Image (cartoon, grey):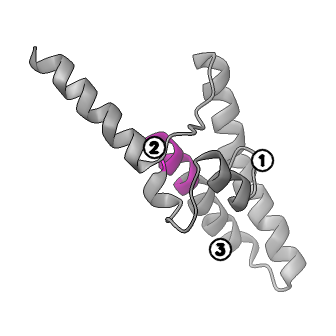
Amino acid sequence: MAGLTTREYKNLKDLKKENLRDNMTNLELVLNMLAETSTTELSKKEQPKSFSENKKVARKGGSVAGNARKDLEKKLGDSVVSPLNAKELGKRLEENNDDTEE
């Protein structure tokens, strides 16, 4: 996602052995699912036979999500890729709940 390798993405979120998906925001998950689903549908349509053909289909599927991410970031004026991991996201959620209870 966002042009990062899995290792780079895990480093961004300061993860060692933790699962990357468990440490994604809802928006990151949705964009990841868009890439996967797009790739699956393109693969069904194009029916790639070789590894290189599959790689091309995967790149096309990833570009669908990449374009959606870039478009949203342009409209938001901010990155949708978060360096926060699950522990940090949980703290933010607790803080927001504390603020609404007051």
Give the class, few, some or many, for how many residues have Cα within 10 Å of label 2's Cα (few <14, many ≥20): some
Question: Which residue in the protein does label 3 denote?
Answer: 44
Please indicate whether residue 46 sits to the left or right of residue 72 in the image: right
**Residue depicted at 69% across the width and 65% down the height:** 42
Q: What is the chief secondary structure element of the magenta stretch?
A: helix
Say if mark 3 contacts mark 1, CB within 8 Å.
Answer: no
For the C terminus, give its image quadrant.
top left
* Among the two numbered marks 3 and 2 on one chain, the one whose residue lies closer to the N terminus: 2
Q: As rendered, which of 1 and 9 lies closer to the eye?
A: 9
Q: Position of residue 56 (x, y in %)?
A: 84, 66
User: How far apart are labels 2 and 1 at the CA level?
Assistant: 17 Å
Q: Which residues are magenta?
A: 24-33
Please indicate whether residue 91 sits to the left or right of residue 30 in the image: left
**At label 1, which amino acid type do we have?**
Gly
* Among the two numbered marks 2 and 1 on one chain, the one whose residue lies closer to the N terminus: 1
Kind of element beneath mark 1: loop
Question: Which residue in the protein does label 2 denote?
Answer: 25
**Residue depicted at 64% across the width and 25% down the height:** 73
Question: Which residue in the protein does label 1 denote?
Answer: 3
User: How far apart are labels 3 and 2 at the CA level?
Assistant: 29 Å
Give the class, few, some or many, for how many residues have Cα within 10 Å of label 3's Cα (few <14, many ≥20): few
**Residue depicted at 29% across the width and 34% down the height:** 93
**At label 3, which amino acid type do we have?**
Lys
Please indicate whether residue 98 sits to the left or right of residue 75 in the image: left
